Image: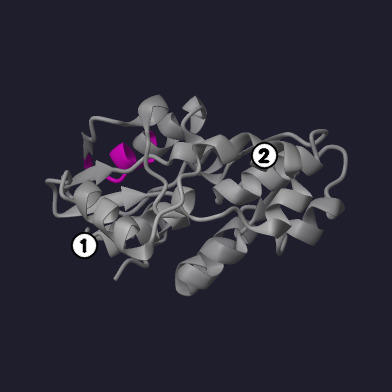
Amino acid sequence: MFVYFPSCNFTRTFPKTSAAAKEFMAKQGVRVEGCCRPGHKNLTDGEQALVVCQTCTLLIGERRPDIPMQSAWEYLDSLEIAWPDYHGEKITVQDCWRARNNDGLHAAVRSLLHKMNFVVVELEKNRRNADFDGEWLYRPSAPANLKMAPRSFEAIQPYIQLKSPEEAQALMQAHAAQIQTDRVVDYCTACHTGLLHGGANAVNLMELLMGTEG
């Protein structure tokens, strides 16, 4: 059985979309959990976790290595669904640094966009070469994350480069300046927030799938 973790950060950032996604998953027969911090304890043999958040991926992955896990995008891409049609709109894909080694996620994101009739535009640093994670790498890791998944988050520490708010803002603006399409699609809350701070017209992939953008 599949178990969907809707992500606290994702739900706060996209309340309407998160509610629609949870309703959609439930209709597919997927069990919908709450916060991954207590919720990972409820996973049982024979279940598979579906995650929409890169932090949830790290936390559940370390705490429950006995449970298979995949991105929600891979699950959604496996469904025979008539997704919304965006009529050949060109859209740039923003890959997330924390998901840079997840080839299955990268493929599913692009497959879903093609199924929605988007023309996908790639950034130079994409997929395994992605170096963007919003401002996530410019701030200290949350102590609660370090405590709950020390192996995963300690491995990230060498990549963190603390920046002032002004420095981070300048980096977000420089990154957004690369985007040549009207909209850029992301699948990570930190990336989404960073893109918006940089002035990009960002939309989350789940907003497109659920038809809740704008």
Residue 45 shows in the view: yes
Q: Quadrant of the N terminus?
A: top right
Residue 103 horizontal side relative to residue 142, left or right? left
Residue, disc 2:
154
Secondary structure of the residue carrying numbered label 1: loop
Does 102 appear in magenta? no
Q: Nearer the viewer, residue 142 or 107?
A: 142
Residue 39 locus on image (x, y percent): 78, 58
User: Tags 1 and 2 in contact by the CB under 8 Å rule?
Assistant: no
Cα separation between marks 1 and 2: 31 Å
At horizontal 35% and vertical 35% (from top left) the residue drawn is: 110
In the visual, does 76 lie left or right of 123?
right
Front-most of 194 and 147?
147
Q: Quadrant of residue 124?
A: top left
Q: Which residues are magenta?
A: 111-119
Placement of 183 over or under 119, stated as above or below: below
